[in-house]
Image (cartoon, rainbow, N blue to C red):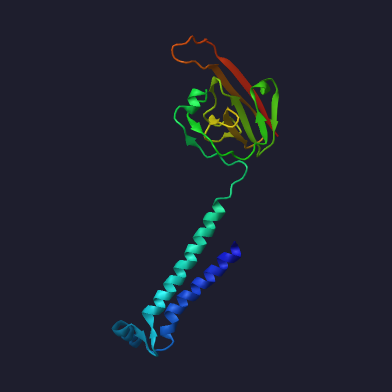
């Protein structure tokens, strides 16, 4: 990338010199050059200064456009910690127990550590840089973190619905070593007009990052 940048800079400087040098090389006196070009747009010897400037401008614009596209392409590369891309499907997520109607249809990068409700009785081990994913099944109303928890950086969207496995998903990135507790709760998912059990289940997860 640095080599390309040097090449483009070199070409840019050449174009700038060309737009000035072609005229300046023909006429010895600066005042005479300015007067002739202002009156006719031509340099001594038949060189069209306006055409030279136009060609130089097109070359410069092309080089700048190429560099812009290449820099943009570099910026699209993402690591395993990249956040998933969400869409909104009205009524889908909340009707299945997720905290919102945000749905992810394209699978994000696979996590380093996957956690399910059964794991709340054990310590979850991870390493710095790992993506830790909590998969909580449809069928109850889930509530979970909305901000980062200690050294665990919360990815957005938090608690999105994943249709493929019918899960509400939270993802974190382990930023540093340490221990943190992630707490989720669930309650009955009830329909209008039907009897609804009144309970709340608390599920704490202990995550240790080395």
- Residue 15 vs residue 3: left or right? left
Question: How many numbered circles are shown?
Answer: 0
Q: Which residue appears at 67% of the width and 36% of the height?
A: 112
Is residue 42 or residue 91 the one in the foreground?
A: 91
Look at the picture and state if 36 lies above or below 185: below
Expressed as whole percent of the image width and height from the top left, the position of residue 123 reads 70, 25
Is residue 103 or residue 26 the one in the foreground?
A: 103
Residue occupying the far left of the picture? 39
Expressed as whole percent of the image width and height from the top left, the position of residue 78 reads 59, 47
Look at the picture and state if 120 lies above or below 15: above
Q: Which residue appears at 54% of the width and 37% of the height?
A: 105
* Residue 125: quadrant of the picture: top right
Q: Quadrant of the C terminus?
A: top right
Q: Which residue appears at 47% of the width and 29% of the height?
A: 101
Expressed as whole percent of the image width and height from the top left, the position of residue 165 reads 60, 29
- Residue 33 vs residue 210: left or right? left
Expressed as whole percent of the image width and height from the top left, the position of residue 39 reads 29, 84
Look at the picture and state if 16 lies above or below 39: above
Q: Which residue appears at 43% of the width and 71% of the height?
A: 58
* Residue 131: quadrant of the picture: top right
- Residue 188 vs residue 205: left or right? left
Q: Quadrant of the N terminus?
A: bottom right
């Amino acid at each position: 990338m640095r080599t390309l940048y040097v090449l483009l800079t070199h070409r840019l400087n050449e174009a700038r010199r060309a737009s000035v040098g072609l005229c300046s090389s023909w006429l010895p006196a600066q005042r005479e050059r300015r007067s002739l070009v202002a009156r006719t747009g031509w340099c001594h010897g038949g060189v069209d200064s306006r055409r030279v400037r136009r060609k130089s401008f097109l070359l410069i614009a092309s080089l700048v456009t190429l560099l812009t596209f290449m820099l943009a392409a570099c910026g699209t590369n993402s690591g395993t910690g990249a956040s998933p891309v969400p869409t909104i499907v009205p009524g889908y997520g909340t009707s299945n127990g997720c905290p919102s109607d945000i749905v992810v249809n394209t699978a994000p990068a696979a996590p380093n550590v996957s956690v399910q409700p059964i794991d709340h009785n054990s310590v979850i081990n991870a390493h710095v840089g790992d993506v830790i994913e909590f998969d909580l099944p449809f069928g109850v109303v889930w509530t979970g973190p909305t901000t980062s928890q200690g050294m665990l950086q919360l990815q957005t969207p938090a608690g999105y619905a994943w249709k493929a496995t019918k899960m509400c998903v939270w993802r974190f990135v382990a930023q540093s070593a340490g221990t943190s507790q992630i707490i989720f709760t669930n309650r009955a998912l009830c329909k209008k007009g039907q009897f609804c059990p009144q309970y709340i289940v608390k599920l704490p997860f202990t995550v240790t990052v080395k």
